Image (cartoon, grey):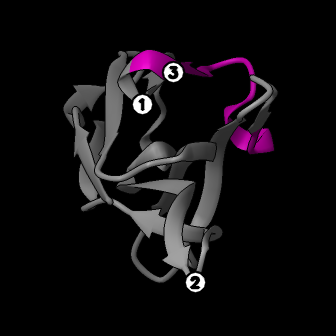
Amino acid sequence: VQLQASGGGLVQAGGSLRLSCAASGRIFEINAMGWYRQSPGNQRELVAQVSSDDSADYADSVKGRFTISKDKAKNTAYLQMDMLKPEDTAVYYCHARILTLRPSSDKMDVDENDYWGQGTQVTVSS
């Protein structure tokens, strides 16, 4: 399983960016997809996550500005970031919790693992 992230870049405060994260490989089911971010000197924090039932969670700092969505057929999640602020500057990491099937004796076992994509830089200038 691999996660391929795209998007990000440099934008002025108040601007918008969109991140994409596509999962590929021997996927049985995706339980959740989302983004974390990390800025220098800070811990990695959850930005937004969408679950298999389409419920979404957001960090308080991005509520009302960021919107997460997904295309289940494409195993892809999107993060639309509007009204960006300088404090949104960070490396954004795509994350997914994915179920895969593993042969075991005469049956298939289901494994659940966390996967990470490469980080993508988001820089918001004031």
Relative image position of residue 118 (x, y in whole percent):
24, 62
Instruction: Say what amino acid the circle numbered 2 marks.
Output: Ser
Q: Nearer the viewer, mark 2 or mark 1?
A: 2
Rounded to the nearest angstrom, the CA distance separating label 2 from label 1 is 29 Å
In this orientation, which residue lies closer to the viewer: 1 or 41? 1
At label 1, counting other C-alpha atoms closer than 10 Å, the crowd grade (few under 14, some 14-19, many 20 or more) is some
State which region is magenta: 58-73
Q: Earlier in the sequence, mark 2 or mark 1?
A: 1
**Numbered mark located on residue 36 in the image:** none
Examine the rendering and report whether any part of residue 126 can be seen.
no
Instruction: Say what amino acid the circle numbered 3 marks.
Output: Lys
Q: Is 22 included in the stretch rendered in magenta? A: no
Q: Earlier in the sequence, mark 2 or mark 3?
A: 3
Residue 39, above or below 24:
below
Relative image position of residue 58 (x, y in whole percent):
74, 38
Badge 1 vs badge 3, beta-carbon distance below 8 Å: yes
